[in-house]
Amino acid sequence: MTLLDKFKPLEEARDKLRALGTYPFGVTIEKILSPTEAVIHGRKVILAGTNNYLGLTFHPECIAAAIQALKEQGCGTTGSRMANGNYADHLALEREFAEFYRKPFCVVFSTGYQANLALLSTLAGAGDVILLDADCHASIYDGCRLSQAEVIRFRHNDVEDLKKRLRRLGERAARTLIVVEGIYSMLGDMAPLKEIAALKQEYGAYLMVDEAHSLGVLGEYGRGLVEATGVEDQADFIVGTFSKSLGGIGGFCVSAHRELDVLRYAARPYIFTASSSPAAIAATRVALRLLRDGTELRARLWQHARRFRQGLENLGLKLGPILSPVVAILLGESREQALFIWHQLLSRGVYVNLVMPPATPDARCLLRCSLSAAHSDQQIDRCLEVFAEVFSAYGSA
Ligand code: PMP
């Protein structure tokens, strides 16, 4: 047994899937044409599996701001904010996020993944408890691993299960951080946040909400599920990413707790990594304004979500539980069959995400589709035509 032998099963699994046709993980986007179109395998395809909810990746104002920052401030910062200094724009973006959320404190991170690592590893230490929804994202699980806290999962979206666990914790509830997401990335469903916020109040715990997929998507002003459910004051820490509705790269956390600002001096994923490039920050500053003023973009996104879901329901497909811009098509347990269906869609010009266990909530595979405000009605209809062709020919896996 050598150091590298452990990779054998992974390599075999990869090669087995590869032998069946195009490998679905890490597809090469040969050319990106717009927020909704790309060239893959020499063919123009509709992108129906991005997280580009508001379609801002090609927004001329974001691009112009990025180019200007690139010219004036260079390609990169070459170091961390703690060791090498803050660029003024990083601080400006923090102020803008804080204003947007009407919270006094904000910290910007280099990615949303790092925001979760930083928050969880620093907020919850030895003797503390993290109570997380079982369907939370890998970055939340990884943050838990970095923390010294006791980690307890509650059943996905199950308020009763959460309550039972909080009750069992007794006085330790005051040392507990509850972690949930706004929109869950795989099934597109949402946390019952009003009830969860009420429980955290009742038991004196703290609440962190990852709005990665709901920022810009939910709420009149796009502040996510906390806004849509009216619990902004009860959410102690709101985390998010720039990599979805903001069309860039980076992460943030806002809070009314001044300790968030102190966390900068303790959070290793903040201290020991380079800060975001000036271009990324400049584009995000513009994108945040567009997101806040993006009522029409949100309306279009939801209109597309309704049209797409209705079309898929008409085909009799098994879908995720609720109307959402993230649409899961639930398949069976056969990876080969799921890959075949995914490949058929791609070869007819529709790119979606293929998700296999353990990334899925259960043993089944799923196709994850996501809508963008930048899609046209024609693109949605074309996707539905392709789904109809593929599923009528090959069944539902
Ligand atoms: N949280 C959730 C819920 C996510 O889905 C993701 C990205 N898929 C992240 C955090 C990480 O965000 P980023 O891409 O900015 O690292």
Image (tube, rainbow, N blue to C red):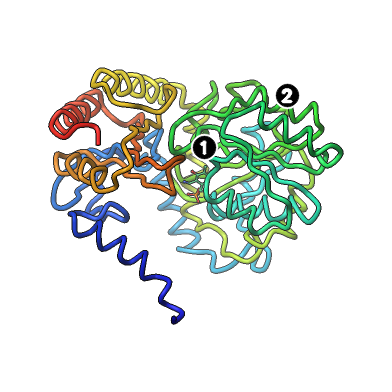
Q: Determine which quarter of the picture holds residue 82.
A: bottom right
Of badges 2 and 1, nearer the viewer stands 2
Q: Secondary structure at mark 1?
A: helix
Q: Determine which quarter of the picture holds residue 245.
A: top left
Task: Give the numbered dot on residue 198.
Answer: 2
Q: Secondary structure at mark 2?
A: helix
Residue 254 horizontal/vertical position (percent): 67, 40
User: Which residue lies at the image location 60% right of the left edge and 58% below the top edge?
Assistant: 87
Label 1 belongs to which residue?
288
Quick check: 376 left or right of 247?
A: left
Identify the amino acid type marked 1.
Answer: Leu
Of residues 88 and 264, the one drawn nearer to the viewer in this rendering: 264
User: Which residue lies at the image location 62% right of the left edge and 60% below the top edge?
Assistant: 269
Quick check: 176 left or right of 35?
A: right
Most extreme residue toward the right is 171
Image height of 93 relative to 8, above or below: above
Crowding at dot 2, Cα within 10 Å, few <14 / some 14-19 / many 20+, comes out as few
User: Which residue lies at the image location 58% right of the left edge and 22% below the top edge?
Assistant: 228
Of residues 44 and 105, the one drawn nearer to the viewer in this rendering: 44
User: Which residue lies at the image location 40% right of the left edge and 34% below the top edge?
Assistant: 53
Q: Determine which quarter of the picture holds residue 155.
A: top right
Which quadrant, please, contains the C terminus?
top left
Residues at marks 2 and 1, CA–CA distance in whole angstroms: 29 Å
Ligand 1 within 8 Å, label 1 CB: no
Identify the amino acid type marked 2.
Answer: Ala
